[in-house]
Image (tube, helix red, strand yellow):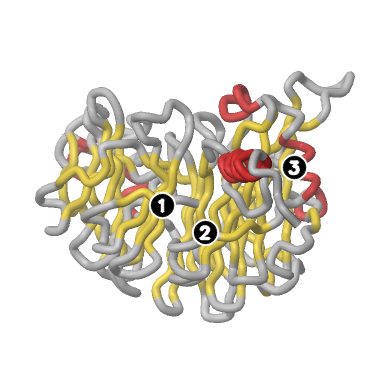
Amino acid sequence: MRRDPKVLPLIVCLLLVLFLIPTSNAAGASPVQLDSISLSFPNPQRGYVLSLYDCAAKTCAALRSTGDAGSSWSVVPIPSQLGRRLQLESWGTFGTTYATLTVHFADAKNGWIYGTVPAPVTPTTASPNSVSRLWSTHDSGKTWQQIRLDPLSLTYGVVQMATHGAWTYLFGGSNTGGADLLGTRSNVDQWSRKSSAEMGMPAGGTQLVGSFTFAGVNGWFVAGNDRSFTASARLLTNGSWGAWNGPSFESFGSSYTSIDAVTDRVLLAEGESAEIVYPPGSSVPSGWNNGASWLFISYDAGASFKPFRKLSSSYQGSYYSTVPGLPAVPVPGTILLQHASNSSYQLVRSTNWGRTWSVVLNDPVSQVLFTSPTTGFALVKERSSQATFSLFRTIDAGSHWNKVSV
């Protein structure tokens, strides 16, 4: 059969049009301008990135996974209720109204998403209205279940999660002022109280935050805000958490800071004066009461910390370790922190235990995660982007960073 010679060019044009149509809404394709908000790597190869994006003036979420350390990514379903909740709020106002969502996977099958999401406004609630939620999957995201927080006395919500060995732990609080650390075997949601340590909620100040760190069979946990530490615990051999006095520089009146385990005996932290507690001058580092920040180090698995290196003399030009994953010490002697410059924040790196520093990312970061001594990931707010964070990767212990397409 002969073809009309005029038809062939038309077919070619149609194919080109179809090929060039943006596939941002197709299954497996990345939505336009993803805002990556949380990162989880249960092992060096397997990782997850939770992102938000604008979908017709509403807020939508996307979850991606990699099995090759970020070289390629695939779609993971999100909880259907989470999708419906997010679309109650416009993309333009979501980030300024609600606390961020967080993803945590213990392994390729078992994961959780937690945080604050929009809720319908009722006659008895404020506008906008929000609720704390926790969802879990035990089949790689094929199905998700909502975990009720009221029976767990976590009406304030989940603050932080971590996995160590066969156990997954979470820390959260209640609106009545209590806080607790719970645990479960990672393949189920049988949450129970796992800490005998006294834990509390901040009486004022910024939002409660917390962090876990592990080295070998040892683990440490701290929580607090810009005013002080409010909780601390140490992992016991039976998988539960016992009382720990916390970092000794807490008694100086330090703001909360996360701690990084360099080894099972050596811990590093960046402490900054909250300028609320004023102990005798002889008991604190020089200039501490002026809002100075210092690196503190412990050589005895957290029993005591010593002032190690002065970072700044005041809040101006301070170094920050409240970013999840900071301070990061991928190899002994190499430290990464966020530094406040005159106009923005920078990710800085030292290879000589903090004597000198160099800028490795001239943009603010919201999370840093090293999966090996050389490979790490960061969520970076590029200067060219006004509102969104992108995924960056390093393969040389934080010296150089490159953007990763998710």
Query: SS at mark 1?
Result: loop
Q: Residue at x 54, y 35 (%)?
A: 207
State how far apart marks 2 and 3 are (Cα). 20 Å
**Which one is nearer the viewer's eye here, 57 or 254?**
57
| Identity, as a three-letter code, of the amino acid under mark 1 | Val
State how far apart marks 1 and 3 are (Cα). 25 Å
Question: Which dot, 1 or 2, sits closer to the camera?
Answer: 1
Q: Is residue 328 left or right of residue 109?
A: left
Question: Does label 2 or label 3 sit earlier along the sequence?
Answer: 2
Crowd around label 3: few <14 · some 14–19 · many ≥20 (10 Å): some
Question: Which dot, 2 or 3, sits closer to the camera?
Answer: 3
- Quarter of the figure with residue 381: top left
| Identity, as a three-letter code, of the amino acid under mark 2 | Ser
Tell me where residue 313 appears, x and y as whole percent: 17, 33
- Can residue 201 be seen in the rendering of this structure? no
Crowd around label 1: few <14 · some 14–19 · many ≥20 (10 Å): some
Q: Residue at x 28, y 61 (%)?
A: 329
Where the N terminus falls, by quadrant?
A: bottom right
State how far apart marks 1 and 2 are (Cα). 15 Å
Q: Which residue is mark 3?
A: 83
Q: Is residue 95 left or right of residue 26?
A: left
Q: Which residue is mark 2?
A: 40
Question: Does label 1 or label 3 sit earlier along the sequence?
Answer: 3
Please, is residue 54 above or below residue 25 in the view?
Answer: above
Q: Which residue is mark 1?
A: 404
